[in-house]
Image (cartoon, rainbow, N blue to C red):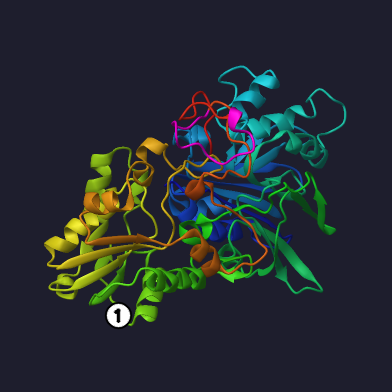
Amino acid sequence: MKEACGVFGVYAPGRNVAQLTFDGLYALQHRGQESAGMAVGDGAGLIVVRDMGLVTAVFDERTLSGLAGHLAIGHTRYSTAGTSSWGNAQPVFRDGGPAGFALGHNGNLTDAPELACRTGMLPGLVASDSDLIAELIAEAHPRGDEEPLDLREALRRVVPQLEGAFSLVLLDESRLYGLRDPHGFRPLCLGRLGGPEEPEGWVLASETPALDVVGASFVRELEPGEMVMIDADGVHSEQTAEPAERAPSLCIFEFVYFARPDSRLYSQEVNGARRRMGERLADQAPVSADLVMGVPDSGVPAAEGFAHRSGIAYGQGLVKNRYIGRTFINPDQETRATAVRRKFNPLRESIAGKRLVVVDDTIVRGTTQRAVVRMLREAGATEVHLRIPSPPLRWPCFFGIDIPTREELLAAKMSVDEIARFLDVDSLAYLTLDNLLAAIGAPGDGFCHACLTGDYPAPVPRHVTFDAGAEPVHDDPESLHASVLQGALPGI
């Protein structure tokens, strides 16, 4: 799976906002490794720098020294439907007003083709749904008007037209903006630099570790449909759209996989939730074994919880090459399988002659797990019992995560026993949805778990359908009719 992107914004007169943005993006690097960029405003104009590669490849001391200002936004990108190219790197910039504006987007619009067509945009005019949002904002106040672009008013006009997932950070020459879609699919939080009585500045970020690294204190998560505007007078909040009926619907995989373990969501630390997933998995699917090990990195906290609850010793069975990117970004099955061996190597003395419980966060195509199991058996493991601290992944996502079509999802076409045989494991068990929700422990807060259940909290693209006998739970099933997005604008 490709992850959601990372967005960051800071308003801090008197501070080195380019350095703060660099540090914030570095803390969000796990959310996007294809490209990085930032836009900096100084009250008179904007400078935008973006390029392909990691944050440290795009920015160095020389680059940062030329980015002076008092507010900035930044972005790290994974593409969900579009190509990985410089043209799709963010922030997106548009003319308008004295200096124009820049935008960073985390999410995926589900009405992008229809919206582009409805607004009269010709094919090829915009390269991605993020580009489309920027174009709509710019067109909300034509450049020929005498009055300068009012970004706040433009957002009020444009946001109600958008469907799907979008957490946005924007800036013009003097103001920073942040907003979430009415469902709250993707995370976005607000932090404060300095003390509560005399704040030195304000920060927006996808995850709380980006606040920590710049020395900001967490204030709160933005509400679904909320927009905040930050300027010299502080933080101003308003609802650009009423929260959806099933809001909030935060992606449940933020807890399972995407977010850093030290992130806090719904007032819960992600690491603790993942440990509790492992504990409940040990209760739900016990097994006799000699060693519990996690597949680094996201499987490790759940493995620790499984070992603690089961009483089976916990240990390391795989060493991870920290300089290898995540294997799901590789374009074909053979390349992904080869990349697994580059990424992991077994600790043979820890494994030989042992019955292993192997904990991994989820199974998508099964490529990684199959290669890992083969390595463990070659290293001398006598038994391999696979435990997954989330339910089977059976449905595609349209809200910002590049989960493949149903044809590529192993659990959509195989039973649990069939998957176990395919992966060559002695046993396989998934955590139930009820236990997953209980482990997260966020009573009263809502999640999108459509990729697990087919229960979509918002309309999916009208040109999408699912195979017969596997229809999702949805209020508008007639809006579903092709198994892949065809002709949709690239996501972010």
Inspect the magenta stretch and tell me whether residue 467 lies in it: yes
Furthest residue to the bottom? 311
- Could you say which is closer to the camera, residue 471 or residue 24? 471
Residue 173 occupies quadrant: top right
Residue 402 relative to residue 411: left or right: right
Q: Position of residue 216 (x, y in %)?
A: 65, 68
Which residue is at a point 23% across and 57% down the rendered structure image?
372
Q: Position of residue 182 (x, y in %)?
A: 71, 46
Q: Position of residue 45 (x, y in %)?
A: 72, 42
Q: How many marks?
A: 1
Which residue is at a point 17% across and 73% down the rendered structure image?
354
Q: Residues within 10 Å of mark 1 (few under 14, many from 20)?
A: some
Q: Position of residue 61 (x, y in %)?
A: 50, 56
Magenta span covers which residues? 464-478
Image height of 145 relative to 54, above or below: above
Inspect the magenta stretch and tell me whether residue 380 lies in it: no
- Magenta stretch secondary structure, dominant: loop
Residue 103 relative to residue 401: left or right: right
User: Badge 1 is on which residue?
Assistant: 312
- Could you say which is closer to the camera, residue 315 or residue 388? 388
Furthest residue to the front? 469
Image height of 95 relative to 352, above or below: above
Furthest residue to the right? 146
Residue 67 in sight from this viewpoint: no
Residue 378 in sight from this viewpoint: yes
- Tag 1, which secondary structure? loop
Residue 38 relative to residue 243: left or right: left
Residue 197 relative to residue 452: left or right: right
